[in-house]
Every structure is written in structure tokens, then in C-alpha cells.
Amino acid sequence: MMSAQMKQMLHLQWKASRWPMLPFALLCVGLPLMAVSTTMQAIAEPHHDPSYAASGVLDMMSGWAGMFALLSSLLGAAVALTSWTLDHRANHVYSLALPISRARYSLFKFAGGAFVVIGGGILLLIGCLIAVSVYDIPEPLSTYPFSLSLRFFIGALLVFSMVFAAAAGTIRTTIYIVVGAIIVVIFGPVLADIINTVFDTDFGTPGQLILRALTDWPGPFHVFGGSWMLIDV
Amino acid sequence: MSNAIEARGLNYRAGKTFEIRDMNLNVPAGSIYGYLGPNGSGKTTTIRLLLGMTKRISGDVTLLDHRSPDDLPAALAKIGYVPERPHLYPTLTVAEAMRFHAAFYPTWDAQWATRLLRVFELPHDRRIARLSKGETGKLMILLALAQRPELLILDEPTDGLDPMVRRDVLAAVIDYVGDTGATVFISSHLVHELERMCDWVGVLDKGRLVTEMPITQFKAGVKRIRLIGAPEQALGTPFELLSRVPEALSDGESWVVRGWDDPMREYFEARGAKIRDIVDLDLEEVFVEMLRNSRQGVTR
Amino acid sequence: MFDDIDPRSPVPLYEQIAARVRVAVVAGEYTPGAALPSVRQLAASLRVNPATVVQAYRDLEREGFVEMRHGAGTFVQNVAPGLREAERMKQARELVRRMLAEAARLGIGVAELSRALAVESGVGE
Amino acid sequence: MYRSLVVSMCVLSCSLAARGAAAQGTALQDRAREVRAAEDSLLGLQRAAERAAYPSDSARTAERLRRDPVDSIRVGPLLVVGQRSVLRYAEPAFREAWSYYEPLIGRAANRLEGQRFAVVEGGRNAVYQTRDSTRVIRVPIGRPRLASPELNLSSAYHAIGKALVPLLPFEVRSWLFDVWGVPGQLESAYRHIARSGADGTRRCMRREIPACVGVLGLQGEDWSTWYSVEQLQNLIRNSDVLRASPYAPACFRNDAHACIDVYRSRSTRPNTPLGGNVRQALMLWTLEKAGAGSFEKLMVPDSSDVATRLVSMTGRPLPDLISEFRNDVELARPRARADAGRAAIAGILWSVVFSFFALRSTRWRIG
């Protein structure tokens, strides 16, 4: 059973994020419908050779893939921001006066946000299932509503947890993070170049290293590097 | 437990201008403790230090026998806190805020909360963002009271509220104290408001706790004495001299003293000074003279 | 009845409350057996510390004006006639003392004062 | 304050997804082309650098050569030349690629004796010159920390393939479009087959093996096995030149021969339904199946066609062979689902890590 406190935190998250989440909810259902319907319209145009339907669908779908990923990360970021803004607005005074530890409160908040993200994933799944059942998908293509929705949910959860963690900090910690990132990006390559010339070593530039560490498995952004196509071979 | 709040050697610094140095604060259990100080003297900061919202440099704080900040959740479960500025989630309605609050406090008294809601005439289905200032203040007090705390910490609870609301709020607090004997720590810069209800006062000025004593002692025999030919040195006085200033219109001097008793007239007569007048002072005037004294460092 | 309680007065609040009750009792406003407001009620309505009210009631009880019955409340006693007279006199003298102090500050002599008293009370009747 | 962070993160995730999507569509089968393009551009860069370095800056060149001298290593019969810093990364790639080819090509390895490969680091200029530039195969090699090691391996495969192509007879070379493939491209082959709209490919997809044989170009240029009449009509209709052919009206009246005549009359042909990649994948797959000595059968310098050679290499009838190839390709169909599962595990783990950071959210927020 869910504790009364968790229930209240969920309710709070719901009240805080329902209006900002409305456009996201519409997009989650609408994006797959939009993607599939425009694709199907494009390949149904008179001058389009129907025998090339499959390759047309694949091309269009790879164009839409980025939109799914973008929506996923925007959803995650928006949920994270809405979960903390209320606390930021009053300097966290109310939550600090509650008789629970700070970690427990943050965990409640995290869980509340994660529920909203799950909701987004479910809406996207619904949209995907509707989209692939309404339209005839040309052979030999397959549809991947479940794996795309899973990917969407994971991507959103990931961005949510990152932004949530950053927003959980004070302004000071955020400044540290941003300044640290800027230093790595600006001075990292210079430093790496100096080290490489002086010691004749061959580290890559930190930027490249970091990018690879982030995107290759099991890096945190790996999920954004895979296939975001609802319809694929 | 003899003290509901105890701070020992509290140190804090903010920037270059404000600091709290070696503060010792004792709020006796069961008392109504008035924490007085002009705006900017550090009342709110002290409260945040006590409640573990602001990090102190050093010092020990004990709340209801729980050490802060290690054992804060246990202490906070028994503390009703009303901050100086609204802190509730503005998107919740009044009823929702009450349900939220209730979930976190095992001692929540739903029946009494409902009664207070009626007494305060709060619209239960209105969003907090749309409440008036007075309504928000009343709701904050309602939440703090309905959790039936052992210790109420009120930070300027009536600041900016109209007299009607002020009266309702304080009456509710006193009603609760009369019922339960809870401790109240109430900060204000409005002295006369606290005058009738407090039994202890702490006076804060520029981060320094100037004095801390029972209010009867604080007010005992406080007089303004207008003198002609006042002695240069005020040594060996049988009373406590809070301040002395030259009179504006005559060549006399005006002394504010504490612990005055009529036989002490002798002190002046023996030194050739003539008493023109002795006037009673209220708490606010004592407070003002106290601050003047502490700032000028007049000899005691 | 407690409207003119003045926290700024040098007279302690409990003393002021006790004095109001005493006056009411000797003036016959409170008949014997009548219940005083509960501590909690009176404190809340006056916005004074409940301890202050308790102290006032205790003083009154010691002086024999009221009786505090545990759990039931505070009730006006049947005041002995001697006590009633003594209290009335005490109140009268208190009034006069205050008047004299004020007069002294204004430099008004006792003779002037008693003349004024005669005039005022004559006009008043 | 953290809003900018969010924006940059969204941009990053979006671009990654775009990259991922692009990769899904093209990268695998186009890796060979990319490597070649990179090589060509490197060649230009290198020449320009050499022109600049000779002779005006010879002192600097000498200095660079002193610090990082040119060396060579032998990998089987192959000779790999390059600066030591680059050779370090080229060597494992070449060894692995050669260990794949050696059993396949058997005694033909002798024909590669002394074949030179000049390894050039991407982004830097080579500071040495080669004597016989026509015989030398240039190989772009990246530092493994920057470019993935698989890319270097692919470079090596490709370079050795370049050395192999000249050994083949004309029929085989032209069938392969002069390119030797990279092993393990069955998934890419599946993508090509799935994308292709040609009637023959569709029928191949539906397990019609003769159609597979046709679209793989194993029956010569038999277009009627590639495209249906309607498809040919569509293709002709969409081209001004072909539409103007005198045979076009007959073609539009569903005369299949006339449609072929349309192309003949313009000395052109329709595109092959499946590109070189699928043929190259079939070739390597067959070699792997056929085992030792089969490469020599491929090399026999007579005019027998590829189909015949495939049969003689494996000793199996062609439909049997192609059917098995088709099945293997279908088994190699990319599994998006499995990929999502792995990404999900990583994503959830990272979310837990980040949530742990969030749990450490400080209570010292004011003052």
C-alpha cells in the first residue's frame, strides 16, 4: 500500500504539473499519430511509386526519430522543473519544516515525478498503438510501439533524474556544475593538446572522451543513440 | 525537560555586516517567550538556525530534547512553525494543504482543524495562491495549531495583518496554550502585541541577545526619572540604569532606570540632585531604552 | 468588564484582572455562586498568557473572593461583609492616590482638589 | 539558472537521437563508403601538406620524422608502413583482418607478397613519401580513443580487400562493382533487401528463390526478374529521355519486351535492385561457407560467370546456396527490441545514480 505521505506528494506533483503537462500529454499521444499519418500521406501521393513504400516510410520515420527523442527529453526536463519550482519559490521552508529527513522528502518528490514520466510513456504507447493499428504498414516493415515507448520512457526518466538532481541543489551547486562543464569544454582540449605535445601521449581531447563516455554503452545517453523509429525493418 | 529550546554558543555569519556571536538562548518549557528585536536584528535568522534551515558555524541547539540538526525530524514532528512569509504550496487548495499537512504529523487533530477552519472563516476549496494575506496567515496558524505541537515557533505571525485577523490569530494561539500548556516562541518587532501574553522576553539587537528574563522582572520598577543637577558619575546606584539623556527643553537630564523603589530617592537627594518627576514606562519604552543602552554601552 | 485591561500600565496584568473581579464582586455584579470565565476562555479573549489569568484567580481565591473547583471552574464566593467593606475602601483609596499623584505632577494643591471634588460631585448630582 | 543546462541537454539528446536515427538508416552499410571518402580527403590533405613541407620546411619535417620515425611491420605477406605512432594502432587492426582473410584465401596469399599499405593518421599529415605510389594502398587509421577500434578494423579489411580485387577475373570484379566487402554485413544486407521496392526483391523476401537469384545479378542483366512490367512502366514514365523512346507506347501497353527495348534504345539500364553491398556480403558469406581453397576457384582466369563459380566453390546447387543465404540474412534482421532492453538497463541505472545525487539535496538552503 502506498503511504499517506506518498499519496499526498503524488497529489502535490499532480497539482503542480498538470497544466504544464497538458501540452506534453497531447504531444505524447499526438506525435506518433502525426508521424505515421504524415508518412502514410507522403507515400500515398500519386507520383510516389508504391513499390518503394517501405523505403519511403523508413526515410520519413528516421526523420521523426529526433522528434521523439526531443519530446522525451523535454518531458523529463519539464517534469523535473515542475517538481521543484514550488519549493524553490518559498526557499524550501515548508519542506524543511516537515518532520521527515531531507533525503526522504527528495525521494518522495523523485517518485512523484517518475510517476508523471511513466504517465507520459503510457500516453505515447497509446498513441503508438493507435497509429500502427489505424494505418496499414507496408511489408516487410515491422512496428515497434513497445520498444519505442520504453525508450521514450527511459530517455525521459534519465533527463528527469538529471535535471531533478541539478534542480535539487542550491543555485550555488548549479553554478558549480555549469562552470565545471564550461571549463572542461573550453580548457580541456587546450590542456589535452599541451599534454599530448609535451609527453607525446595520445589522449583524446576530454570533450571527445566525455562524449564517448556519455553516449557509448553503458553511458547515460546511450538510450538517445539507439533507434527511435516507430516503424523499422 | 526544563527548556524547550536551548542554544549554546551559537555562531553564524552572513557577509561582512551581520553576525551572531556566541548566542545562548533558553526558552523555558511551558513559557510564552517573546523574541523582540527591531527589523533586521536577526530574529528570523535565529529561528532558521534553530530549525536547521540555515547552517551555523558552531554551537549546539536542542529542541524539545532533540539535538538539531541530527535529530531534527523527531523534533519537527512536535513543532508547529509559522514563518514570517507564506511558505505553503500555492497550487493547493486550503483543504488540500490541510490533508497534506495532516499526512506528515501523527498528532494532527482533524476535528479541531475543521473547527478552526470555521472560526477563521477560511474558504476550504480556494487555492492558496488566491487567498488574501490575512487568510494565508490564518491558514498557516491553523496548520501549525492543528498538528497539536509541543512547541510553537511563530515568526512575526501578525506582521502585515489587519487588527481583526491579528486578534483572531493570537486568540487561537492562546486558546491552544491554555488547553495544552505548550511552549510558544514568538518573534515580533511589535512590542505591545507581545506585552500582554509573554511571560519571558529575549531582546535581540544586531545579532546579539541583549537580555533574556521573565517579563515581570523585565518590567519591574522601570521608571523615567527627570532630574535637575544629575550626578556626573552614576556609581553605586541601587537601581539599574538603562539610559541617561539630556532633556531637550530644560537643563535637566532624563534617566531610565529599572528596579526602582521609592526609598531610592535618597540616592539622588544625597548627591544634591532634584527629582522633578517620575514616570511609569511600558514595555515598548523599556525595549527602546534597552536597545539604546546596549548600543551606547552606558555604564550600568 | 475586562475591556480596559491595559498591558502598558505598570500595574501587572494579573493584578488588573484580579482588581476587576474584586470590584465586580463587591459591587454585586457577580452574585455568590456565579461562574467566572474559564482560564482558557478569558486568556484567549484578552490575548494574555493563561498563566496570568491563573495567577489572578489564585490571588482572588487566597483573598476569599472566589473558589477554584478542580475541573469545574472558578466560582464567586459568598464574601464576608467586612471583606466587602475593606475592599470598597481599598478601591476608593486607590482612586484618590492616583488622583493625588496626577495632581502633584500638575502642581495642584489638596485644597484646590477638594474644592474641585465638591464642585464636580455637586454638578454630577 | 539550471534552465540553460536543461536546454543544452535537450539539444544534446536530440542531436544524439538524430545521429542514432541516421546511423540506423545508413551507417552500417555505408561504413565502407565513409572510410573511402575519408581516405580520399586525407590523400588530398596529405599531398597538400607534402607540397608545403617540401622543401621549404624540410627542417621541420626532419624534426617530425626524428621524433616519430617511419617504420614498417609485416603482417603475413603484407607490409604495413607508417609512422610509429600510427602503426601502433594499425597493427592490431591489420593482424585481426589478416587472421580473417588468411584461411579464406589460402595459397593466394602468395600473390599478396610485399603488398604495401601506407597507414596515415586521420587529421595529421604524413611526413614520408613512397616510391611507388600506384602500388601502395593508403589506409586511414585513427587513434582508438577517438575513432572506435572497429573503424580501424574496417579500414584494414577494406585495404586488404583493395589488394584482393585486382586478383579476380573481370566477371567477378564487375559483379562486385570492383569493391571487396567487409565481413559481417548480413544485417546491412537485410536492410537493403527490406528497403528495395523492386518486384524481384519483394518476391525474394517472400521466399521465391529464383527471384533472389535474379535480383542478386546471378543471371546476368535479366531485368524482367528485377522489376515487374508496371514498375518498369513507372520508371520510364518518370524519365523524360526514356518516355520519348519509340518503344515506350508499346511498353505502356504492357508489352514487357518493349519496356526492355526502351532501355536498350537509350543504351542504358535500370538500376540494380540490390547494390554492391549485398553482393559483397554474399561473396564473403560464400567464401566462409566454402572454406579453404575456394578463393582460388574464384580466381580462375576463365570467363565463367559468378553463379558458376559460387557453385564450384561450394559444390552445392545454386538455389540451395541462395536459399540458405537468404535465410541467414533474414536471421540477421536488426533487433530493435533487444537494443531497447539494453538501453533501458543503462538508463535506469543512471537514473538511480542521479536520484542518489538528488537525495543528497542539502537542507542548508537559506542564508
Image: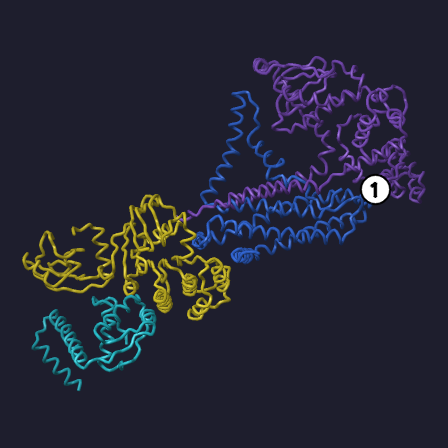
Chain colours: A blue, B yellow, C cyan, D purple
The C terminus of chain C: image quadrant: bottom left
Residue placed most toward the observer, D292 or B282 = D292
Does residue C105 appear in the picture of this structure? yes
Query: In the rendered structure, which amino acid carries the disc numbered 1?
Result: Asn
Residue placed most toward the observer, B234 or D33 = B234
**x then y, percent, for residue B146:** 43, 63
Packing grade of label 1 (10 A; few <14, some 14-19, many >=20) is few
Where residue D320 sits, quadrant-wise, is top right
> On the image, numbered disc 1 is attached to which residue?
D238
Of all residues shown, which one is farthest toward the bottom? C125
Relative to A183, is A195 above or below? above
Relative to D17, is B79 above or below? below
**x then y, percent, for residue A223:** 63, 41
Where residue B140 sits, quadrant-wise, is bottom left
Does residue B162 appear in the picture of this structure? no
Q: Given the image, what chain letter belongs to the residue carrying mark 1?
A: D
The N terminus of chain C: image quadrant: bottom left
Q: Is residue A74 left or right of residue B212?
A: right
Q: Is residue D103 left or right of residue C35?
A: right
